[in-house]
Image (cartoon, rainbow, N blue to C red):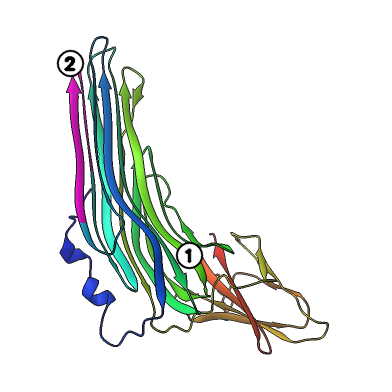
Amino acid sequence: MNRPLSLLALGVAAMLATGTAFADVQWTQTSRTAGAFMTASNATEFAVQNDSQSISTQGVFALSAAVDTSVTGVAGNSTATQTSALEPNAISGRGGFEANTSVTDPEGFADVFGQSFINAYFTLTEPTPYSLSGYITRGGIASAAMYLHNASTGFVHQLEPAADQTLTIDVSGTLPAGNYLISVNVSGFSQEAPPDLLTHASGEWQMDFTVGGTTDAPVIGGDVSLHVFPNPARDAATVSFANRAGERAAVSVYDLAGRVVRTLETTTATTRWDTRDSAGRPVPAGVYFVRVARGENVESSTVTVLR
């Protein structure tokens, strides 16, 4: 992992800055964990080591888990870290893991595992602005994901980097009342068994999630009739919704900063967005909000554009 982990990096004070209007958020269940596990063996020897730490309460959590195990001709190590803080209206942190093996015995085998994750369940009693930023990286035989999930309507954001890539995250909007899960998880295995199997695994993340404040972005996940397909889309996406014959509807597309990218008007139940902005330029790849307004009836969803 290339970036140092420290409490100073959390930015907790920024999350709780004076003047931020917090909503009523109830954290119902949380789990913050870092763990490492390893087995090593050859024809006559076997060793196993495990180290894991976790917390399920609010406040600051700083930990490191580590294993370093060997038998003759077989060695490996794993470190897993996390520094995080859960406050009344925010959760922030960073962490990661790295797993390595070294096997010289032709009959030896090493299996090393590392993990760093947060699962935080919460309930909103009214529509509430939010922001989610950070990054997530995975290398080798690893998985990495950061997501915001609504228990009734599904994923608000499902963010996963490609293999050996770093995904930068900066999204915001407004969440309807409901039950949610905010989660980040990096984990993976390093395995070695000469002469064919040789792997490495690593992952790293940083997350700042706040609930409250103000935004112009539309409510996400509260729709009952709005559908955008295909999703992800490349050259065009169809927006479908319930609409009375002849009723005028405004379909607006927003970027993640809450700026209007394109507005379309229709009197039918479907319209087509050609993934271009109001100047006719193809929009960059990324996630966009789609908002349909028909008088006082407003529905919102998201669409991912690929290039």
**Residue 243 inside the magenta-drawn segment:** no
Q: Where is residue 40 in the image (x, y as percent from the top left)?
A: 25, 22
Disc 1 residue type? Answer: Tyr
Q: What stretch is highlighted in magenta?
A: 62-79
Q: Give the secondary structure at mark 2.
A: loop
Q: Which residue is drawn at 48% across and 84% down?
A: 216
- Camera-near label (2 vs 1) is 1
Q: How far apart are marks 2 and 1 (CA)?
A: 49 Å
- Magenta part mainly helix, strand or loop? strand
User: Mark 1 highlights which residue?
Assistant: 180
Q: Residue at x 17, y 62 (%)?
A: 7
User: Could you say which quadrant of the image residue 118 lies in?
Assistant: bottom left
Q: Can residue 284 be seen in this view?
A: no
Query: Seen from this angle, which residue lies furthest right?
Result: 245
Secondary element at image label 1: strand
Tell me where residue 194 appears, x and y as whole percent.
Answer: 31, 18
The relative height of residue 248 versus residue 233 in the rendered view (above or below) is: below
Task: State the image quarter where residue 226 is shown.
Answer: bottom right
Tally the numbered discs. Answer: 2
Query: Which class describes the residues within 10 Å of circle 2: few (<14), some (14-19), or many (20+)?
Result: some
The residue positioned farthest toward the top in the image shown = 44
